Image (tube, coloured by chain):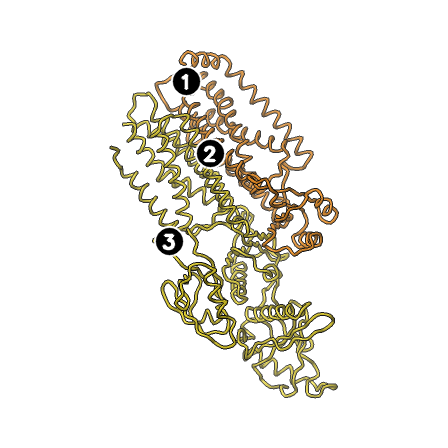
Amino acid sequence: MAEENLQVKNWHDKYYKILLIIPAILIIFSFVYMINFYNQHGDFIKKDISLTGGTSVTLYDKLDADKLKQELQNKLEEVNIREVYDLISKEQKALIIETKSGADETKKVLEDYLKYELTDENSSFEFTGSSLSQGFYKQLLIAILVAFVAMGIVIFLIFRTFVPSIAVIASAFADILMTLVVVNILGIEISTAGLVAFLMLIGYSVDTDILLTSRVLKREGESLNKKIFDSFKTGMTMTLTALFSVLVALFIVKSFSSVLTQIFTILSIGLVFDIFNTWVTNVSIIKWYIKSKHG
Amino acid sequence: MAKLTFKIWILIIVLILSLISIFGLPPSFLEKGILITGVEQNSSAFESGLRQGQIITAIDGKSVETIDDFSKIILEKYPSDREIKTIIQTKDSEIILFSKQAPEITISGIPKTNLKAGLDISGGARALVQAQDKKLSTEEVNDLVAITNNRFNVYGISDIKVSPVSDLAGNHFMLIEVAGATPKDLKQLIEQQGKFEAKIGNETVFIGGERDISSVCRNDATCATITACSDANGGSICNFQFSIYLSEIAAEKHAEVTKKLGINESVPEYLSKPLDLYVDDKLVDTLLISKDLQGRVTTQISISGSGSGETQEEAYSITEENMNKLQTILITGSLPYKLEIVKLDTISPILGEQFIKIILLAGLGALLAVAIVIFVRYRKFKESMALLLTSFSEIIIILGVASMIDWNLDLLSIAGILAVVGTGIDQQIIILDESKQRVSLSVKEKLKRAFTIILSAYFTALVSLLPLLWVGAGLLKGFAITTIIGITIGILITRPAFTDIIKNIEE
């Protein structure tokens, strides 16, 4: 065991700077992808109707989504329909119909097609006006930005040294950026809750970085590699518990709540990148910093 | 034997208080009876002393344990053609009701806990309202909230929460929340400006609101009734009539305007011009004015209107509704501007219970996943159990605080709790690992170091949550507050206790 560790450490001592190429490439790719994405869509994300405005109807009925979509397509704006299944019985429970049209119009069109009245016993309606949702979107972006900056300031106040603080902030930034790219590649339409998940990611992703940096900077009398390896053991336990619990929760709520599904999906992706960015990006930077400081 | 330190005692005490806060003392799941969730204002039930929040335990000496018990007894007695006596035994008092109709109350079973699920889980309606083409000031929103509250009360919708909210961009909104089933005409009720005008020719004689109208007869068959129904054009029409009392100012204005009128040529008992009633600039009825009233200061005026439907039954209920609406705006007056609903969510309550089960299952699953990772990593029963039990008590304390401050747990709050427990477990892992370091430091020193890391993590999480308090018209406040409460409980109560527990185990 000890020998094996030694080998790993020797290997890491040799290649830690080169390892930084991987996050560098990924970050450059992410930037290029995002610039491209922005040029194509005019925004950083694909927004769902809670951010663009429109109506989402949950209809507790068993109907064929494709057929219904064909029926509604010409009568409502940008219709999107999903089927919802029970986790255990796999039986269809509901349909979620999303459209940019208003609530009254959507209700009328649906009622005309279904030939029954929609009440709160057979359906749920969520309508958001477009100016309100655009306001939400802007404010949430500001909130995420403010949160990120505030987090950065706290990090600087804690460590009071430039490079280690920047390393933590850069890793958190890389986490969010890479998660965003994956979310966009998967074509997920982000809701208000999804943006909140990104905000949660800020808090989650700096935890392990703080652990690593404080141990490396503040603990005395141990070799650098030992400090890093100990932090790695602790940090991996932290991230893996978080990741497993989020994945289990995701599996259970999936199809039942789109709000929670989206939050948990974004968190899982973010946590995977957190492992990478803490133990590759952040470790390499801080190792480089300590080694160059001590000659 | 492990010693119970001060910090561990605090955890235990807070935990017990939280359990009391969640389940009540004595625990509400042991209580028998049904809960009154709403009482119609000015109804005979209200006048006899029935109030929201009371728990009915027996009626006429027969014990009531379920909603079925209640319905059975009430359906046997009512409706009745004469006033009958009903003795309603509540938990603290005995109420005697004389009525022809069933008590005008809404009921539900006694909730097993004091926890309240948010609208997006248990169902209900939520509306965010702004003025059309106008930015509201704080005062205007407060006025709007007061008028709307009054309107709902008068209209007979209880169990509704109206509050002013604002957002980062300085917009003010009125937030309306109704738990459970959504009232059928909620949207209309919110949106209608409710401008009532009574005009003779072009001159306004009086308007809705207490300046011109001193009282409106309602819920009293002697002065507010549905007069007649008749079949017409394949449908049915009913008429209603109720009296109102004008204020001195309005009555004088009425006298002054009628003085100038002539006699109606075709029907000489009436004056030449009628009294036209407008609601939101739409003519709803035209009343002929008897010539005896010309120039006289009369305070009592009879208002009428109608409603139609396909069947007589439908027409009757629509007429009743129309009458209620008209009475409501006559009492509450109009809003000074048109309103626009910028967000309206009506969530069906039918899946509520199943939803809560799924969420509990997800929570349990997540905890189990954590347990597996922890046991695999540490392979020590005591430490792992200490970690899991501390996290579990953290959830209970968060829920305890939530029920104490009457917080509605919506989906985002639930995600927040999960995030809190997740970071909480992370921090306990740090404590556990620091305590195991082979460095020649005392356990106390090691744990102190762990705490520095944890405090840093706490502050970064806290500052990143704060902006959410002002974003999105308060709709994300639930998440922010739950998470802030959660991480603060962690840093103040559970983490210190966990450190002492580990100290106990290690030493």
Relative image position of residue B91 (x, y in whole percent)? 37, 62
Reply above or below: A22 against B405. Answer: above
Reply above or below: B460 against A6. Answer: below
Relative image position of residue A192 (x, y in whole percent)? 57, 43
Could you say which chain is coloured orange in the image? A
Q: Does residue B104 appear to the left or right of B207 in the view shown?
A: left
Q: Nearer the viewer, mark 2 or mark 1?
A: 1
The numbered mark 1 sits on a residue in which chain? A
Could you say which chain is coloured yellow in the image? B
The residue where tag 2 is placed is: A153
Q: Amino acid at mark 1?
A: Leu
Instruction: Please report contact status of discs 2 and 1: CB closer than 8 Å, yes or no.
Output: no
Q: Does residue B143 appear to the left or right of A290 in the view shown?
A: right
Relative image position of residue B471 (x, y in whole percent)? 53, 46
The numbered mark 2 sits on a residue in which chain? A
Do callouts 3 and 1 point to residues on the same chain?
A: no
* CA–CA distance in space, label 3 to label 1: 59 Å
Q: Nearer the viewer, residue B62 or B19?
A: B62
Relative image position of residue B318 (x, y in whole percent)? 63, 68
Tell me the tag on residue A224. 1
